[in-house]
Image: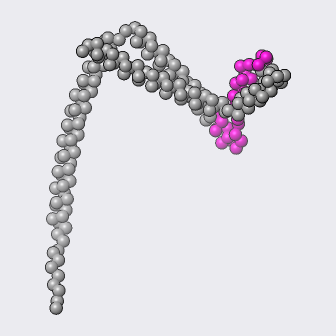
Amino acid sequence: MTIGSHQSHFNHENWIRQLHSYQVTSRQFLNELFKGLRVLLQRGLLIIWNEICLMFRQLTLQDFIITALIIAIGIFGVIIFMTGLGLFFYQAMLWLQDGVWTQYSLFFVFNFIFENTSLHQWILHPESWFGLQKMFFWFLDFIPLSAALIIPGICLTLFMATTLFIIFTYRFYQLRNRNV
């Protein structure tokens, strides 16, 4: 008994033609999709811009003062963060040059600010409250100055950005509901 093979020959030209037609159809679909999305985005941005202009005209001097104050505090946070980051990169450059990590702790700042004060003398030579002195000394000596600048700088900046977003959102809905 012979088993006949009824396999058809693979027609690669037909397959390539079919693949090309799929490619052309998908290209046309994506072009139309992007055109539609662009039109919708332009209309949406125009509506948003008109809303912003309408709300901007209704803002008071108090709104601008509060916004400026929040932005100034946020910029101060960015400056603190960038100072800490700059100090860290300075330490890294010194380490790359010498192979020894130069440690800057909070104690350097404490000595600079409180030099020749009774608090400075108490930290260096305590006469009472020895446990509290050890805790403060450890804290000032252990915490790196770069981390003590970077972490509060990020926290302050993010807090002010979040506060600004919440205030803008609240004020937007407040003004919008007044007009409705």
Residue under the point 44% across and 11% down = 65
Farthest bottom residue in view: 1
- Front residue (pair 82, 6): 6
- Front residue (pair 46, 142): 142
Q: Residue 170's spot in the image, x, y percent?
A: 37, 19
Q: Is residue 95 above or below residue 140?
A: below
Q: Is residue 154 toward the left or the right of residue 19 in the image?
A: right
Q: Is residue 156 toward the left or the right of residue 52 in the image?
A: right
Residue under the point 67% across and 38% down = 94
Q: Quadrant of the N terminus?
A: bottom left
- Front residue (pair 161, 108): 161
Q: Residue 20's spot in the image, x, y percent?
A: 19, 57
- Front residue (pair 112, 28): 112
172 within the magenta span:
no
Res 79 → quadrant: top right
Which portion, as a residue range, is magenta?
90-119
96 within the magenta span:
yes
Marker count (numbered): 0
* Residue 106 in view, yes or no: yes
Q: Residue 116's spot in the image, x, y percent?
A: 79, 17
Residue under the point 41% across and 19% down = 167
Q: Is residue 136 toward the left or the right of residue 90 in the image?
A: right
Residue under the point 49% across and 27% down = 158
Q: Is residue 22 above or below residue 65?
A: below
Q: Is residue 27 above or below residue 173?
A: below
Q: Quadrant of the C terminus?
A: top left
